[in-house]
Amino acid sequence: MKCSSDALIHDCLRIRLVEERIVELYPSDSIQSPVHLSIGQEAVAVGVCANLQVDDWVFINYRGHAFYLAKGGPLPEFFAELMGRRSGLSKGKAGSMHLAAPDVGIIGASAVVASTISHAVGAALAAKIRCQWKRIFVANFGDGATEQGVFHESLNFASLHRLPVLFLCEDNGLAVHASTRERQSYDLKRLVEAYGIEFHHIDEGYDPDLVFQRSGEVIRGIRDTGAPAFLRIKTSRYREHVGPGEDFSFGYRSREALQSWLAKDPLENRRAEFQEIEREIKEEIDAAVQFAIDSPFPTAEDLLTDV
């Protein structure tokens, strides 16, 4: 699969601008749910999803805006969902942490850490039973999810039954306010390989071109063999764990520590080059926000529908 550098940058910038608009809107209380922003992590979602097909499913987590948008989730319905409107993805009843757009292969997220990993494995098993070859099932999670029991069970099952699962770890080195060294006594590579699963690693999670190329190699390997693979991509969360602000005042990380990552981020150091496409993207965002504002709220009759 080919994808131009300009297209990748465009999609990364689009996600960043969408989330910057969320930051602007949040104090007005027009957004009716907590938000876990992907600012700083856009290149991971864009680079990986550029290698996926429509019928490849991505099981996202509660920090899922970037993957939702990179996989092709509609923007007006996204804002309507965040604002609790009836025209939202789930009629305004799910909010930011439970996004779903099955038509483009985004399968419902959950606020429970690691809970969708086993769903990806189960979907891959069902596809294999139905002889639906060459499909990929992506389990997207943070490094904190690797501490959960279901993570280990899912690795074992996917390896044992040779299932086409991409275990995709967005490693920003944090679980809420705790660093990796405070939480993990194990070496992740050795742990994954103990289950007979190939382990791949990308340090430059700020570079959408490199993520696209390297993740593409891993994904092609899964399509060719039908076997699972693990890909860890180092990245950085710029904003607080939950919410639109910054949290350097808590003392668990410093602004200075973030500077080395910001210096490499093309959306930061090349922003002046993107003024024209930024203007076009902002017009799209304006229209999507207005769609949400103009949409009605759910009624009492909607309360128990789709349950």
Image (spheres, helix red, strand yellow):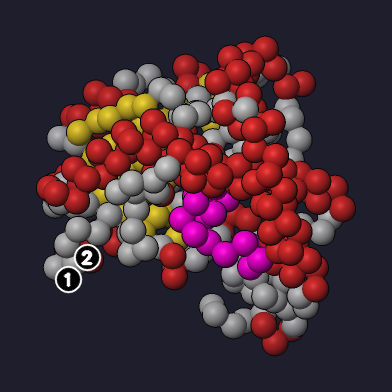
Task: Work out which residue is located at the far top of the displayed protein and give it.
Answer: 256
**How many numbered circles are shown?**
2
At horizontal 14% and vertical 68% (from top left) the residue drawn is 131
Q: Is residue 142 above or below residue 92?
A: above
Q: Which residue is mark 1?
A: 130
The picture places residue 61, in percent across and down from the top left corner, at 49, 49
Q: Is residue 176 visible?
A: no
Amino acid type at mark 1: Arg
**Distance (Cα) linking label 2 and label 1:** 5 Å
At horizontal 58% and vertical 14% (from top left) the residue drawn is 260
Amino acid type at mark 2: Ala
Give the residues in magenta.
Answer: 63-78
At horizontal 19% and vertical 58% (from top left) the residue drawn is 134
In the figure, is residue 28 to the left or right of 125? right
Q: Which mark is residue 91?
A: none
- The quarter holding residue 174 reads top right
The picture places residue 28, in percent across and down from the top left corner, at 87, 53
In the figure, is residue 179 to the left or right of 248? left
Helix or strand or loop: what does disc 2 sit on? helix
The one nearer the camera, 241 or 231, is 231
Helix or strand or loop: what does disc 1 sit on? loop
**Cβ–Cβ under 8 Å for marks 2 and 1:** yes
Q: Indicate the quadrant containing the C terminus: top left, top right, bottom left or bottom right.
A: bottom right
In the figure, is residue 156 to the left or right of 261? left
Q: Is residue 249 visible?
A: yes
At horizontal 54% and vertical 36% (from top left) the residue drawn is 41
Label 2 packing within 10 angstroms: few (<14), some (14-19), many (20+): some
Q: Which residue is mark 2?
A: 127
Q: Is 35 part of what is drawn in magenta?
A: no
Label 1 packing within 10 angstroms: few (<14), some (14-19), many (20+): few
The one nearer the camera, 141 or 10, is 10
